[in-house]
Image (spheres, grey):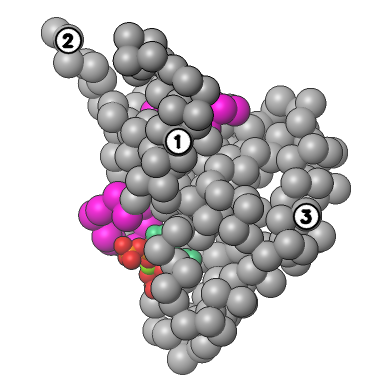
Amino acid sequence: MSETQNKIPEHVAIIMDGNGRWAESRGLARFEGHKAGTENLRQIIKTSVEFGVKHLTIYAFSTENWGRPKEEVNGLMTILETVIDRELNELNTEGVRICHIGRLEAMPKRVRSKVEHAVQLTQKNDRLILNVAWNYGGRDEIVHAIQEIVREGTTVEQVTEELVSQHMYTQCSPDPDLIIRTSGEMRLSNFLIWQSAYSEWYATATLWPDFNKEEFQKAIDAYGQRKRRFGKR
Ligand code: IPE
Ligand code: IPE
Ligand code: MG
């Protein structure tokens, strides 16, 4: 086994971008792109387990995505519900723990209770931790953390990096080692802005529905070549 194959990131986070362009390039409605993207996710979850990745975080709906046409937002909510209904038992059997990151309270009630059920049902699993970022925004997360810290009556001296980390939504996982963005965009788009301080970045022009096992392997290999210094020598 080569040296690169040995270096598997413990936590991979993915900005699953490009569903709309994938659909439009085929003359299909954007909704079809989101459906294809969801199908692809199933494969990527399986591959993560195969590769030995322990934590997978997926950016599925941002706090800014509410600004899209109502029809698209509703379509995405329906997809989330359908995915939970269809996949939950299998994911649970396979030992996947589902954690949600983002503001649950702003989500439609039915979707919210399905997410809560999925989190509760899988809480003892530990083969793969799957963080689903839904109604997630990094700035919103920081605001939420500050609100909680103030609410708890914390003194100035008690505010440390560790304390702030403890108030982030990402309580199921350590900081991501590798962040992948598909579709060629080179920006954070409000994803994990606190946790990504020392994450390695990988961008590919491949659109999310086409991001397959081979593409995933390329990202893992690129990660294996990186030298992480964390500011040290
Ligand atoms: C990513 O695909 C999924 C979400 C943001 C919900 P997009 O819908 O952003 O696809 P593009 O970027 O328009 O191609
Ligand atoms: C980021 O993609 C959010 C998700 C993948 C869920 P966007 O398509 O919303 O980001 P921008 O608008 O291109 O920055
Ligand atoms: Mg996009």
Of residues 75 and 204, the one nearer the viewer is: 75
- Magenta includes 216? no
Q: Is residue 86 above or below residue 75?
A: above
Q: Quadrant of the C terminus?
A: top left
Of residues 5 and 103, the one nearer the viewer is: 103
Provide the residue designation for mark 1. Answer: 147
The reply to whether discs 2 and 1 touch (Cβ–Cβ < 8 Å) is no
Q: Residue furthest left?
A: 233
Q: Position of residue 159 (x, y in %)?
A: 36, 16
Q: Position of residue 40 (x, y in %)?
A: 58, 60
- Magenta includes 188? yes
Magenta highlight range: 170-189
**Ligand 2 shows up in which quadrant of the image?**
bottom left
Q: Is residue 40 visible?
A: yes
Query: Hey, what amino acid is under mark 3?
Result: Lys
Provide the residue designation for mark 3. Answer: 114
Pointer 3 or 2: first along the chain: 3
Q: Quadrant of residue 109?
A: bottom right
